[in-house]
Amino acid sequence: MQRPELKGLDHWVAFLTQADIPVLKQTGRDLAVLHEDQNRLSARSVASVIAVDPMMTVKLLRYLQQNKRRSQTSEVTLVEQALIMLGVEAFYNKIPATPTVQEVMTGHMDGMVQLLHVIHRSHRASEYAYDWAVRLSDLHYEEVRIAALLHDLAEMLMWCFAPQEMLGIRVIQQQDKALRSRSVQEQVLGFALTDLQKALVEKWELPELLLTLMDGANSTKPRVRNVTLAVNLARHSANGWDDAALPDDYKDIGVLLRAPAEQVMLMVGADAGIVCDLSKPH
């Protein structure tokens, strides 16, 4: 996909606001199969397909916010709830599962591989957050799951529409692992991805609750802490279960769940072959 030469946060926010968000090819296939089977077609079955695709999830929520009815007084944060309000057939007609990531990123195979890694990582974070919310008897566990799923949305979008710049950031960070992600992003893009994320969520008027849950500045709140720790664990474990940051993650998650770090390791499926001495400072 061709895009104009964009510089600065405001230009990117404007571009991404107008851009048609791509979705995973598998999402389109699964939605098409469901649509052919009227006996299985329902808001719940469609929501279960959308649930694993952060791009399709935000595509739906953004559409609903941009076409909000005057009678709608409360925010819609759940996918199934959004589908019920919109109507399943209206969803298929108004929010098609196109374009696909593969179409948008034609000729950028390296970037697409990295995008798929980020999406997989986000999916794992959403599963962790969901599981912990249930353990903590949080009745709004689905909101926590969606917040974790969409936590790195800006990174996904930039891989889609600025793969060369994102690969440049990756190369710099691999050459010097001590560099902070924010400073490298500002050097290459002119802004940090967290700033883009916040600007997009506000511009698209996504539910305030999601903005709160995805904002690490609110980390003293248990539900936000859940999302932050789930994202951290997914990010660090993606480097391998011997990542140096994981012992601290286990301890922090243990505090959240009121469980020993060793139990957390078993709970999240940490590789049994990795021995972490949790008594040592890191």
Image (tube, grey):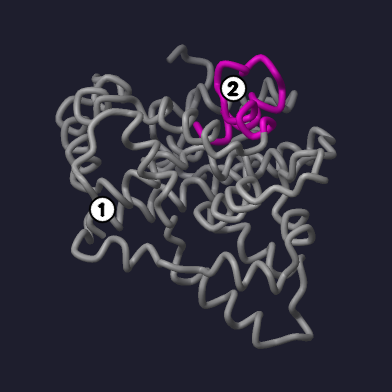
For the magenta stretch, what is the residue range? Answer: 208-233
Residue at position x 44%, y 37% in the image: 235
- Relative to 203, say whether 252 is above or below: above
Q: Position of residue 267 (x, y in %)?
A: 65, 41
Residue type at numbered disc 2? Lys
Residue at position x 61%, y 73% in the image: 93
Q: Position of residue 152 (x, y in %)?
A: 46, 39
Q: Position of residue 101 (x, y in %)?
A: 37, 62
Quarter of the image where one finds residue 82: bottom right
Pick out the residue farthest to the top.
281
Residue 100 is left or right of residue 172, and the answer is right
Say whether disc 1 or disc 2 marks the residue closer to the N-terminus: 1
Residue 209 lies in the magenta stretch? yes
Q: Which residue in the protein does label 1 denote?
A: 111
Residue at position x 43%, y 27% in the image: 194
Quarter of the image where one finds residue 107: bottom left
